[in-house]
Image: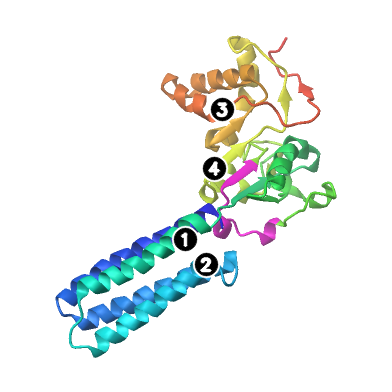
Amino acid sequence: MKKADKKKAEEFLDVMQRAHAAIRKTLKAKNKASALELLEQCQSYAISLGQQIESVEGEGFITVTLLEEYCELVYQIYEEVLQLPQVNEIRVHNRLAKALIKVGNSIRNDIHVRTEVVFLPYKASMWDSLESVWRAADEDPDCEAYVIPIPYYDKNPDGSFRQKHDERDQYPRDVPITNYEDFDFAEHHPDMIFIHNPFDDCNYVTSIEPFFYTKNLKQFTDKLVYIPYFVLGEIDPENEKALKGIEHFCVTPGVLYADKVIVQSEAMRQAYINVLTNAAGKHTKKIWEERILGLGSPKPERKIWKSPGNG
C-alpha cells in the first residue's frame, strides 16, 4: 500500500474513534435514534476501509478480516440498542474501542508501505540523466517505479506551439513505459516525481506539455526532484563572472519549484546556492542550502557543456 493510502486508512480510524465517543454520549443521554445512526455510520466507514485495503492487499488480508469482525460487533450492538430497554454506554464504548484497536494495530504492523515514484523524461536522448536512478528504484522491492515519457513542442517565434514530439517508442526495450494519457496523477499522487527539464514555459525553442510544468506537478506529489539533463563545466563558486554565465541554468522554474535539486558536484551545488542567493536575497540562502544537493550527475557518460564565463 502507498504511504498516502495508509494515511487515509489511519484517518478513517480517527473518524471512527470520534464516532465511538459520540455513541457513548448519545446512549448516556438515552438518545437511541442518534446512537443507531452513528452505529450505521461506523459500519459504513468500516466497509469502505475494508474495500480500500482489500483492493490493494487482496482478499482475506488480516486487516480486512478484523474489519469484518468489527462490523459484526457493530451489528450486534445495533440490535442490542434497538431491542433492549437500556444498554451500558461504557461497556458499548469499550467493546467498540477494543475491536478498533485491533484494526489499528493491524494497519500499522501488517500493511507494508510501498513508495510510488514517477520519472518524467521528455527527450529519449536525455534519458541517461534519470536512468540509473530509475533502475535503482525499479530493483527496490518496496518501490513502484513508473517511467512516463511526456510530449514536447517546438515553438514559433511568438511563443506559440508548433510541432508536437512524442518519443515514448524510443526508450530501451527493458524500460517499461506508461502512457501519460493513462496515468491519473491526482489519483496516484506519487510519493516522488523526478524531472530533468526545468524550464516550463521559459524556453524560447521548445516546451513540454504544459500539464507537466513544475508549478503544476507540485500539487500531485509529496516530493518533486529535479536532476539536470546536462553536465556543466566546473567553475569556481566564488567567481562572479562564472556565476553569471550559469545563471540561466540555475534560476529556472524547475529549481524554484522542486523540493530537491541534484547537481553534479559539491562545487556546483555551492555555485547554484550563490547564484540563487544573489537573485533572491541573502535571507533565502538557507532555503537553497537545504534544497540543492551535490550528489553527482547520474549520467553514465559525463558530457561537459562549456558555459559562458568558464574561460
Q: Identify the secondary structure beneath mark 2.
A: helix
Quadrant of res 300: top right
Q: Position of residue 12 (x, y in %)?
A: 40, 63
Which residue is disc 3 drawn over?
A: 292
* Residue for badge 4: 223
Verify CB contact (< 8 Å) between mark 4 and mark 3: no
Question: Residue 64, relative to residue 205: is it above or below?
Answer: below
* Disc marking residue 193: none
The local secondary structure at tag 1 comes to helix
Kindly identify which residue carries mark 1: 106
Badge 2 or badge 4: first in the primary sequence:
2
Residue at the image point whose x is 82% and y is 49% from the top: 174
State yes or no: discs 2 and 1 in contact (Cβ < 8 Å): yes
Does dot 4 land on a helix, a strand or a loop? strand
Three-letter code for the amino acid on which mark 3 is drawn: Ile
Q: Distance between the residues labelled 4 and 3?
A: 14 Å
Disc 2 and disc 4: Cα gap in Å? 31 Å
Q: In front: 88, or 214?
A: 88
Residue at the spot x=35%, y=61% of the render?
A: 14
Farthest residue toward the bottom? 83
Q: Is residue 181 magenta?
A: yes
Mark 4 Cα shell of 10 Å, populated few (<14), some (14-19), many (≥20): some
Q: Which of marks 3 and 1 is nearer the N terminus?
A: 1
Q: Which mark's residue is nearer the viewer, 3 or 1?
A: 1
For marks 4 and 1 on the same chain, the one whose residue lies earlier in the sequence: 1
Q: In this rendering, does residue 155 appear at all? A: no
Residue at 40 percent across and 71 percent down: it is 45
The magenta span reads 180-194
Whether residue 192 is in magenta: the answer is yes
How crowded pointer 3 is (Cα within 10 Å; few <14, some 14-19, many 20+) is rated as: many
User: What residue would you read off at disc 2?
Assistant: 62
Q: Where is residue 99 in the image (x, y as percent from the top left)?
A: 37, 68
